Amino acid sequence: MNTAFLSPDTALSGTTGLSRNAGLLADWAVRSGLRLARWGMQRAARRNDRDRLLRRLEARAAAETALAERDAAYRSSMYGLL
């Protein structure tokens, strides 16, 4: 990569034809790319975390059991009304 494009001094000279904000834009692009890469690595680590996945499966099973109990109680209470 040519470092002349990141320098604000060379951006002001007539040889490059770049605006004053070219260095700021390049800086923003690099920082955004690094931030996006860091986010992707953290997301991949979260998705592959075995303990976290097991906790989620246990929580889902507990929720399904609670819903089944609630539905059974609801059906039994409605049965007496018919």
Image: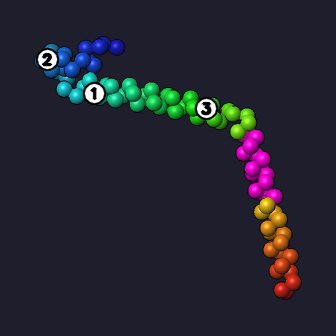
Segment colored magenta: 53-65
Q: Position of residue 59 (x, y in %)?
A: 75, 50
Residue closest to the far left: 14
Please name the residue that numbered disc 1 is placed on.
24
Residue 37, horizontal then vertical, whole percent: 50, 28
**Based on the displayed image, in which of its 4 quarters is residue 68 positioned?**
bottom right
The amino acid type of the residue labelled 3 equals Ala
Residue that mark 3 sits on: 44
Contact (Cβ within 8 Å) of mark 1 with mark 2 = no
Mark 1 residue type: Leu
Residue 66 spot, x, y in % from top left = 79, 61
Question: 26 above or below 69?
Answer: above
Magenta span dominant secondary structure: helix
8 inside magenta stretch: no
Position of residue 74 in the picture relative to residue 40 (left or right)? right
> x%, y% of residue 8?
21, 20
Which numbered disc, 2 or 3, marks the residue that appears first in the sequence?
A: 2
When the figure is inspected, residue 37 is found, relative to residue 56, above or below; the finding is: above
Secondary structure at numbered mark 3: helix
Within the magenta stretch, is there residue 56? yes
Left or right: where 39 falls relative to 50: left
Identify residue type, mark 2: Ser
Q: CA distance from mark 2 to mark 3?
A: 44 Å
Q: CA distance from mark 3 to mark 1?
A: 30 Å
Residue at 82 percent of width and 80 percent of height: 78
- On the image, numbered disc 2 is attached to which residue? 13
| Mark 1 element type | helix
